[in-house]
Amino acid sequence: MIRSVYYTNHHIIPQTNLSIEEIHRALQDPEGLLWVCLSAPTEEELQTILGNLFHFHPLAIEDCTSHGYQVSKIDEFRDYLFIVMHALPSGKFWEISEPIEVDIFLGKNYVVSVTHESYVSPIETVWKHLEKDERLITRGSDFLCHAILDHLVDDYLPVLDEIDEQIEFLEDQVLQSPTPDVLSKTLEMKHALMSMRRLVAPQREIMNRLSRDEFPMIDQQSKIYFRDIYDHLVRLQDLSESLRDIVTGILDIYLNSTSLRLNEIMKALTIVSTIFLPLSFVAGVYGMNFIHMPELGWRYGYLMVWVIFFLIASGMILFFKKRNWF
Amino acid sequence: MIRSVYYTNHHIIPQTNLSIEEIHRALQDPEGLLWVCLSAPTEEELQTILGNLFHFHPLAIEDCTSHGYQVSKIDEFRDYLFIVMHALPSGKFWEISEPIEVDIFLGKNYVVSVTHESYVSPIETVWKHLEKDERLITRGSDFLCHAILDHLVDDYLPVLDEIDEQIEFLEDQVLQSPTPDVLSKTLEMKHALMSMRRLVAPQREIMNRLSRDEFPMIDQQSKIYFRDIYDHLVRLQDLSESLRDIVTGILDIYLNSTSLRLNEIMKALTIVSTIFLPLSFVAGVYGMNFIHMPELGWRYGYLMVWVIFFLIASGMILFFKKRNWF
Amino acid sequence: MIRSVYYTNHHIIPQTNLSIEEIHRALQDPEGLLWVCLSAPTEEELQTILGNLFHFHPLAIEDCTSHGYQVSKIDEFRDYLFIVMHALPSGKFWEISEPIEVDIFLGKNYVVSVTHESYVSPIETVWKHLEKDERLITRGSDFLCHAILDHLVDDYLPVLDEIDEQIEFLEDQVLQSPTPDVLSKTLEMKHALMSMRRLVAPQREIMNRLSRDEFPMIDQQSKIYFRDIYDHLVRLQDLSESLRDIVTGILDIYLNSTSLRLNEIMKALTIVSTIFLPLSFVAGVYGMNFIHMPELGWRYGYLMVWVIFFLIASGMILFFKKRNWF
Amino acid sequence: MIRSVYYTNHHIIPQTNLSIEEIHRALQDPEGLLWVCLSAPTEEELQTILGNLFHFHPLAIEDCTSHGYQVSKIDEFRDYLFIVMHALPSGKFWEISEPIEVDIFLGKNYVVSVTHESYVSPIETVWKHLEKDERLITRGSDFLCHAILDHLVDDYLPVLDEIDEQIEFLEDQVLQSPTPDVLSKTLEMKHALMSMRRLVAPQREIMNRLSRDEFPMIDQQSKIYFRDIYDHLVRLQDLSESLRDIVTGILDIYLNSTSLRLNEIMKALTIVSTIFLPLSFVAGVYGMNFIHMPELGWRYGYLMVWVIFFLIASGMILFFKKRNWF
Amino acid sequence: MIRSVYYTNHHIIPQTNLSIEEIHRALQDPEGLLWVCLSAPTEEELQTILGNLFHFHPLAIEDCTSHGYQVSKIDEFRDYLFIVMHALPSGKFWEISEPIEVDIFLGKNYVVSVTHESYVSPIETVWKHLEKDERLITRGSDFLCHAILDHLVDDYLPVLDEIDEQIEFLEDQVLQSPTPDVLSKTLEMKHALMSMRRLVAPQREIMNRLSRDEFPMIDQQSKIYFRDIYDHLVRLQDLSESLRDIVTGILDIYLNSTSLRLNEIMKALTIVSTIFLPLSFVAGVYGMNFIHMPELGWRYGYLMVWVIFFLIASGMILFFKKRNWF
C-alpha cells in the first residue's frame, strides 16, 4: 500500500495520495515536505518508488526488500540518510525477538518510510496525528522523522514494564515454590532482556549520531529532539540492566533452593534411619533363638527392652536437637 | 511551592519571594544572582515559570514534568545547562532504587531547581545556608549550583556506610549460621550496590563534563569545585566496588556451607547405617528357625554373638576414624 | 592451477588464460581490469606470478605460501592491498574451526586471488558470474574484489542457520531427556559459536577499514559496497550472540535438571525408608522371644499390630503430602 | 610535626628546620629547593603552612585534613600539582585495605608532603637519604618527589610476595586437606588481591600522566623517572593478575573436593547397604514362623543359607568392582 | 660473555670480537652496523659496556641488571629504543611462567642485546645465521633487531602446540575417566594459557608500536617486518583463546560428571533399598510370635509369602523401569 502526503506553502491544506507525477513534482520543491509511506508494498511498487522515482542506492533498496533479520543502522548518502530501526509488534515480551523492521529515507524535503507489515503502530500513529498536530508538517522532514522514531521507541517501555511485572511475580514465586517452571520462565525473561539490550544498543547509537554528527538534512535545532530519543533509549537500557540484576538474583535463589530442598530431604531420611536402625537391631537381638539367653526369662525383660528403646530414641533426638536439625 | 532569592550589588540584603515581574526584571541584570526553587510545583506553576518566564526548551520542561524514572544527564543549550541529578531520600539503603530527581537549570546569572517532592534534603540545606554563608550568593550561579550538587552527593556516603555495616554483619552471620535469610539479605545488598553503581556512574560523568568542558556559564576557577564532586563520586564507586567483592565472598561461603552441611548429614547417616546394618544382619541370622543350627545350642553362643557385634562395630568405627570422618 | 581474465576498453570480449607476457602487458594498462586466480598453485607458480611478475612484498608472498592458521587481516602496501579472509568449506558447522584461507591482492587495475584448495566456493561463483554479470568486469577491481568477499561472507549464514537448528533441537531435548549427550552437543555448539565469533570479528574489522579508510585503489562510491558486507558481518555477530544466550540457557537448564533428578531419587528413597524402617521395627519387637510378653497372648494382638502398621504408614504419607513430596 | 629542609646554591650545607619566615623567603628563591614535611600535623599547623604560607587551594587543603578514604588522584593547579598516593603500613597483606594516605604538593622549587601518621616509611627513608644522596637536593623538586613516590611503590612488592607465599601454601593445602578454613583464607587472599588492584590502578594512571603530560614543574628529562615507577606498577598489576588466576584455581579445586568427598561418603553407604539389605532379608525369611516351611527341616538348610549369603555378597562386590567403586 | 660483530662498507668481511676501543670507533661510523651481544654478563661488564661506552640511561641499565620479573615494554630515548621482550626457555609449557628476559637496545647503527642466561635460543640462532644470511648485516640495525625478535616469537608456537596436544588428550580423558587428576591437569593448562596470554599481550603491543609509530631508527620499509611479527602474536593470542574455550568445556564436562556419578550411586542405593526394605518388613511380620496368627498355620502360607515377595519386587522394578532408572 502506498500513501503519500505533501505540504507546501502555496497550499493551505496538505495534499494526500499523490500520483507518481505529483510526487516527482513535489520532489523539486525545496520548501515543501513530502512523506511517502509504503506499507507492505509489492516488490514492484518498491522498485518504482525507491528506484525509479527517488533513485536511492541499490544497496539501500536491497535492504528494504530483503526479509531477513537486520541490525539497526544508519547509512549516510550524499542527499539522504537511510535509517533502519526496529519497532515492537505489540505489548508481548515474547515477541521482542521478532521485531518489525522500519526503514526510513530522510531527505532535505521528504521522508520515505518502508515497512513489510501493513500495520505498524508508530507509522500509523504519526499518520493519524498529521491532521491534528500541524507541527508535523510545518517543521520540516527532520521533525517528521523524529516523530516516527519517537513513537517507535515509546512502544518499548510498556513491553519492558510487562517484563518487569513478570519478574516481580517470579521473585515472589521463587521464594514460595521454586518449581522448574519458575526456572524456565526466569531464563525466558533473561533471554527477553538480552534481546531487548541487543535491539536498544544499536538504535541508541543511531540516535547518538543523529544528535551529534553534522548531517545537512538535520537542522541544528532539531538535534535536541533526537537527543531526547537518545535519552529514552539510555533509560530503557538502564532499566533492563536493573531487571537483569534481579533476574540473576532469582536464579541464585532458585539454584540454592534446589540444594536446600535436598538438605531437607536428607535430614528427614537421616533422622528416621539413625533412630530406627539401632532400635531394630536391639529388637533383632532378642529375636534370636539361642537356648541360653538369660534376659529372655527375666520377669521384667520385656519392660527393660522398651526402656532401652526409649533411651536410644530420646538420645538420638537430643543429639539432633543440639545440632539444630529440627 | 515557589521560592526565590535575588542578590544584586545595588542592595545589601538579598530579596526573597519575588513576584513574577521581579523575577523577570532580575533576569535582565547580568550582575545579579537569582535562584528560583520549585518544590513539588503544580503543572501550571511549572509552565508559567519554566516556559513563559525563562523560555526553556519544551523538551527540558517535559523532562521536569514527567514522573517516570530518568537517567542522570546534562543537556547543553545556548544560554543555560539542564542538569538532571538524583538525590537519595534518606539513610535507608533499600530506597536507593527510588531516588528523587533533582532538575537544575544553570544560567549565567540564575539557577532554577525543580523537584517533585516538597522536601529534598540538599535543596533545603543550601537554602538554609544562604543566610549564613555569603559565598553562596556572591560567587555566582556556578558556585551555588555546585553547593546543591555537593550536598546531594554528600548524602550518598551515609547510605553506603549503612550498607557497609549490614554487609559486615552478614559476613559474621554467614560463618555462624548460614540460613536462607542470610542469602536473601546478601542478594539484597548486592542489588543495592548495583543500583548505587548505576546511580553514581552517570552522575560522575556529568561532573567530569562540568569540570572539563568549556561552558560559558561556568568560570575557569569554578571547575575545580565540580572536580571535587567528581572525586567524591569516584570514591563512592571505589567503595561500592570493594563492598561488592565482599558480597561475592559471602555468597561463595554461603553456597559452600550448604554443601558442607549436606556432607555432615550424609556422614551421620552413613556412620549409623554402616554400623547397624551388619549388626542387624547377624542378629537376623540367629533369629532363623532352622532345626539344625548348632550355634543356637552352644553354651556361650549368645556371648559369642555379642563379641561378634562388638568386633563389627569397633572395626567400622576404626575405619571411619582412619578416614577422618569424626 | 592458474586462471586469468583480462578486460579492456579496446576489446569487446574479455581475454582469458593469458600467458605470462600477456599478463605483464595487461598490468601496464591503467584502464583495464585483470584478475589472476591461483587455485592450489605449486610453490613455483606462486613465486613466478606473485614474486617475479607482480613484485609483491616477500612477507605477503610468505603469508600466501605458509599453510598454518592465520587470523584475517589487511595489509596496506603502496600500490596494493593484501587481504587475508576465511571462507567456510561447506554447510557443516563442525568445520567452522577449519576455514579456508583466501588471499587477495587488490591493485588499482588488478585482483590476484590465492587459495590452497582447488575448489573454493566464492571464487568459483564469481568466476562463473563473470560471463553473465558484466558489472564485474566494467566497474573496476574494487567492485570485483567486493563481489568475491560478498560471496565469501554470504556462505557464513547457512552455517549459522544450521547451528541455530541444532540449538533449537537441543533446547527441546534438554527439557525432555537431559542426557550427558545433550551436554556434550551443547558444548560443541557453544564452541562452534565462539569459533564463528573469532572468525567474524577480524573480518568485520577489515570491512570497516575498507569502507572508511582512504585507499587509492578503492573509489569513494565503492566504499558503500564494503559497508554492505560490514553490515552482513555485524548481523552474523548479532545472531551468534543471540544463539550463545540460548546455549547458556540450555546449559543452565541441563545442570539444574541433574540436581533435580538427584532430588527426585532422594525423595523416593526417603519416602520408602521412613515408612518401612518404623514398620520393620514394630514387627521386630513382636518377633522377640521374651517369655513374658503379654501382647503376644492377646486375642486381637495380631490385629492390633496391623492397625499400628496402618497408622504409622498413613501418618508418614500424610506428613509427606503436607510437605508436597508427591 | 613540621620538618623542613632548604637547599640553595648560595650555601654549601642545606638548612633544616626553618622558621615560617625562612620558609617564606625560601619560596621566593626560584633556584633553591625546599621540602616541607608535615607528619601527623595539627589542624592548625596544616592551616598555617598550607593555607597562609603556600596559599594552596582550599579544596586541596580540605583533602589533606579530611580523614576518610580517598582514591589516589592528581590535581593540576596553575603553579603546583596536588598528588594523593597511598603507602602500605607494613609487610602485612591484611592491611592492604587500610593504606596510609600521602599527600604531596609539587611546585617548581618546593615539595610539601602531608601524612596523618607520624611515621610513614617512604617519607622517612627519603629524609634519611637526604644527607647521603646529594642528587636528592641538587636535581630539583621533581626528582625529590619521584624519590618519595618510588620508595612508596617499592613497599608494595614485599606485601605481594607475602600474599604469593600464602597462596602457594594454600595451593598445597587444598589438595591435602580442603577444610573450610582453606576456603575462607583463599577468599581473604582474593580479597587482598582485589584491594591491591584497586590501589595500584589509579596510582598507575597518575604515573602515566606524570610521565606523559606536559607539566611546567616537571622537566622533560625527569619524566623517564616517573615512567620507571609506572613500569613498577604495571609489574605489580601483572603479578597480582597471575596470583588471582591461581586463587581461582584453588577455589575450583576446593569446591570440587567438597563434592568428591560427598561421592566418597555415598559410595561407602551404598556398598554397605546394598550388601546387607538383601542378606538381612534372607535371614528374615527363615526367621518366619510358618508351620509349613520345608527348608527349616532340611539337614543342610542352615548351610545352604550361608551359601546364599556368600553368593549374594560376592555378587554385589563383583558388581561394584566392575563399576570401579573401590 | 661479550661478543660483538661489526660490519662496514670499507671491509669485505665483518669484524668479530672487537676491543672496547674498536667498539668505540665503530659507534662513530654512521654507515656501519655493530652488534654487541652480552650473554650472562657480570655486573661490571654491564656497567662498562652499557654505561661507560654507550652511555645508556641509568634506569634502562638498572632494568638490565635487576633479576626480578619484568613486563615486556618499549622505552623511547632520544637516540635509541630500549626493548624488553621474553623468550621461552624450551618447548615445555610448564615453564611459560618462567620466561627469559631479553633486553635489546636499538640504535641507528647498532644493536645491543643483553640476557641473563648464557644460552638463549633466538640470540644464538641469529648469531649463527650471521655468516650465512648476509641480509642480517647489510640491511641495517632495525632488520637485525627484527630477526632476533622474529626468532624469539617463533619459539612460542611449539609450546602452544604442546599445550594443544595435552588439552586434546585431556578432552578424551574427561569423557572416559574423569579423575581428580584430570581436573588438576586441566587447571594447569588453563593457567599456562593465561600466562601465555599475559606474555603475548604486551609483546604484541610493542610490535604494534614498532610497526606504527615514527622512530628515527626504524626505516619506513622495515616497519612491515615488525608488522609481520605482530601478526604472529595476534595468531598466538587467537589460538590460545580457542584453547581456553576448549579448556572451559573440559571443566564443565568434568564438574558435571562428578554430579552424574553421584546420581548413579544414589540410584543404585535407592533401587536396592526400596526393593528390600518392604520385603524385609513382610518377612518381619511373619517372624512375630503372636499366638493367634492364622496365616502361620495355613497350608500354603509360606508359598503365599513368596508370591507377595515376588509381587512387591517386580512392582518396584516396573516402577523404576517406567522412570527410566535403569
Image (cartoon, coloured by chain):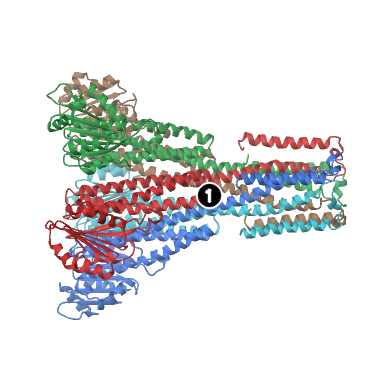
Chain colours: A brown, B cyan, C green, D blue, E red
Q: Is residue C231 left or right of residue E56?
A: right
Q: B139 left or right of A179? A: left
Residue A205: percent from the left, percent from the top?
28, 40
Q: Residue A121: percent from the left, percent from the top?
A: 34, 29
Q: Is residue D115 left or right of residue E290?
A: left
Left or right: residue B88 compared with residue C322: left
Chain ID at mark 1: E
- Residue B14 lies, with reference to residue C26, above or below; the image says below
Mark 1: amino acid: Thr
Residue B102, percent from left and from top: 32, 50
The residue at 30%/28% (across/down) is: A123
The front one of B96 and E256 is E256
| Kind of element beneath mark 1 | loop
Q: How many marks?
A: 1
Q: Is residue C174 above or below residue A279?
A: above
Q: Foreground residue, C144 or A104?
A: C144
Rendered position, A65 above or below E281: above
Residue receiving disc 1: E179
Residue E239: x and y, percent?
36, 45
| Residue A280 visible (yes or no) | no
Examine the rendering and report whether any part of residue D148 can be seen: yes
Q: Nearer the viewer, residue A10 or D201?
A: D201
Corner quadrant of residue D81: bottom left
Quadrant of the image for the C terminus of chain B? bottom right
User: Residue D316, located in which quarter of the rendered image?
Assistant: top right
Disc 1 crowd rating (10 Å Cα; few below 14, some 14-19, many 20+) is some
Q: Give whichever of A293, A85 is nearer the camera.
A: A293
